[in-house]
Image: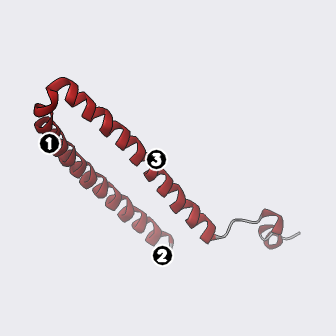
Amino acid sequence: MTEEEEEEDPKEEKPPRFTVEVLDKLTALMITGFSLVAALAWNDAIKLLFKEVFGMHEALWAMFAYAIFVTILIVLITIYLSRLLRIAKEKEKKRTLRLFK
């Protein structure tokens, strides 16, 4: 058997690229869904904590302060992760260009 015949062995069928992309997206969506469920559970727990610690009336202001804090934190994390992703993509692009030179 030649090297070309060994590379195209039908016994070693690889899943089509479409299937891999679907699995990739499905996995990402499932992780996002599970993360949302966890976030909602924490949200309920934190609301109850605020009501216990601050009482009903004061809990409203504390919850708004908490929401503002979490929003700012998430925006900062999103900006940081976006920059990391951009840098990684630029490095990957440079690496790919070097391979084709």
Residue 37 appears at what percent x and percent y?
Answer: 42, 45
Which numbered disc flags the more N-terminal residue, 1 or 2?
A: 1
Find the residue positioned furthest to the front.
56
Q: Point out the frontmost of discs 3 and 1.
A: 1
Name the image quarter holding the N terminus. Answer: bottom right
Query: Which residue is pictured at 50% across the width and 74% down the height?
Result: 100
Q: Residues within 10 Å of mark 2 (few under 14, many from 20)?
A: few
Number of the label disc, if any, that sits on residue 64: 1
In-front residue for pair 26/55: 55
Number of the label disc, if any, that sits on residue 25: none
Judging by the rendered image, the residue that carries numbered circle 2 is: 101
3D distance between C-alphas at marks 3 and 2: 43 Å
Query: Which residue is pictured at 50% across the width and 70% down the height?
Result: 99
In-front residue for pair 86/20: 20
Judging by the rendered image, the residue that carries numbered circle 3 is: 34
Which numbered disc flags the more N-terminal residue, 3 or 2?
A: 3
In contact (CB < 8 Å): disc 1 and disc 2? no
3D distance between C-alphas at marks 1 and 2: 55 Å
Residue 8 appears at what percent x and percent y?
Answer: 78, 71
Q: At label 3, which amino acid type do we have?
A: Phe
